[in-house]
Amino acid sequence: MIDAKKVTSEKAVLIGIISQQQNEIQSEEYLDELEFLTLTAGGVSVKRFVQKMERPNPKTFLGTGKLEEVSQFIQSNNIGTAIFDDELSPAQLRNIEKILDCKILDRTNLILDIFAQRAQTNSAKTQVELAQCQYLLPRLTRLWTHLDKQKGGIGMRGPGETEIETDRRIIRDKITLLKKRLIIIDKQMATQRKNRGKMVRVALVGYTNVGKSTLMNVISKSDVFAENKLFATLDTTVRKVVIKNIPFLMTDTVGFIRKLPTQLVESFKSTLDEVREADLLLHVVDISHPNFEDHIASVNTILDDIKCADKPTLMVFNKIDAYKHETIDDDDLVTERSKIHYTLEDWKNTWMNDLEKESIFISALNKDNLDAFKEKAYEEVKKIHIQRFPYNDFLYYEYKEEE
């Protein structure tokens, strides 16, 4: 596994494609995100390479000519790492390594590396290690190129297990062990959830780096780790919150991202169970990000995958303090008004106003409109609370609050 302590700042080139499934604008957005991921992992993006093609080359991802261009740049600028914006197959990894002669990472490997750095608890470390093992297993061949130089002869005949077969068996055994360990962790976390009683559970969900942990700190008056980097929070944090006369539990969960590795979705099952068992979702969105609508779609896709799309949801559009819109001069008769010219008021009158889900605009960092958010959250929690508790219990909470 990757040792996070040995990770140092290193120069890298980023590589993506423009294809039938991914146009030029989308490709640029994904590479912007890949650059942020690289920075979070401790690397520095030096140059980007993009090629237009119908579909990735099944052997080398890029075309031969483009790959040669990348190779020349890497050799002449002493670049140590090439990072691809899609998951590479074992064959592609092996072929690209032979041509570029440097460390090759794909988007999945990069995200796994960040998760390995961020994991703090035994649960998170186990989940990340399982995902890494599942990713590594089919790619072991590229780690054993020295075996190509072995010759047959005396002592090399007959049945026996080759070094790579031994290593595969070790990895499979490790995966089995980690899965058993996760079953135990899942049971422990399920017991913890059961011990919380019948209090209403609220889960913060959203794209990575949208301000969920900052909002958690403001509402619960706690000190959950928050940082302007991707995946600052891996470990689920639960805090008791009281708004007016109603207590409830608020959970801060791991952030989602586009092209989230399937290994992580599976291994972080126990973390996602917090979302599954929540009574109310607070879907936090960074409205200052130019692609926030794509972020919403990505989160909704994952919520749909884990059967949580139908839960009561409050859309929380965060970072209004950082939101900026383009302006059009009065003399400009050519430029047509589009979404980049929308003010916050304009956005509020679009589909956001037609949503079946409630929405609110805030700045968790500057505490702007926080009272209105608390009122909205209170009303949503109250609906669930009244259904769950007898009327007398509700009066009891109200009485205790007044005392």
Image (cartoon, rainbow, N blue to C red):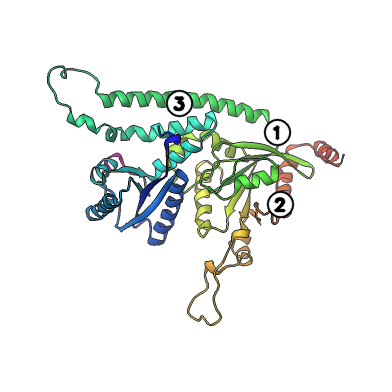
Q: Which stretch did the figure color magenta?
A: 87-91
Could you say whether the residue bearing mark 1 is in a helix, strand or loop?
loop
Q: Residue type at mark 2? A: Lys
Q: Position of residue 359 (x, y in %)?
A: 65, 55
Labels 1 and 2: the sequence-earlier one: 1
Residue 386 on image: x %, y %: 75, 42
Up the image or down, 73 lies above or below 182; here it is below
Mark 1 — residue?
Answer: 198
Let me know if residue 359 appears in the view.
Answer: no
Asked if the magenta segment contains residue 189, the reply would be no
Tell me, for residue 376, which label it has, or none. Answer: 2
Identify the image quadrant of residue 52: bottom left
Q: Nearer the viewer, mark 3 or mark 1?
A: 3
Q: Circle 3 sits on which residue? A: 178
Secondary structure found at label 2: helix
Q: Tell me which residue sits at (73%, 47%) in the image.
A: 378
**Residue at the image point whose x is 65% and y is 40% from the top:** 223
- Quadrant where the C terminus sits is top right
Q: Amino acid at mark 3?
A: Leu
Q: Main secondary structure of the magenta part?
A: loop
Q: CA distance from mark 3 to mark 2?
A: 42 Å
Q: Which mark is residue 88?
A: none
Taking the image as shown, residue 66 lies to the left or right of residue 131, namely left
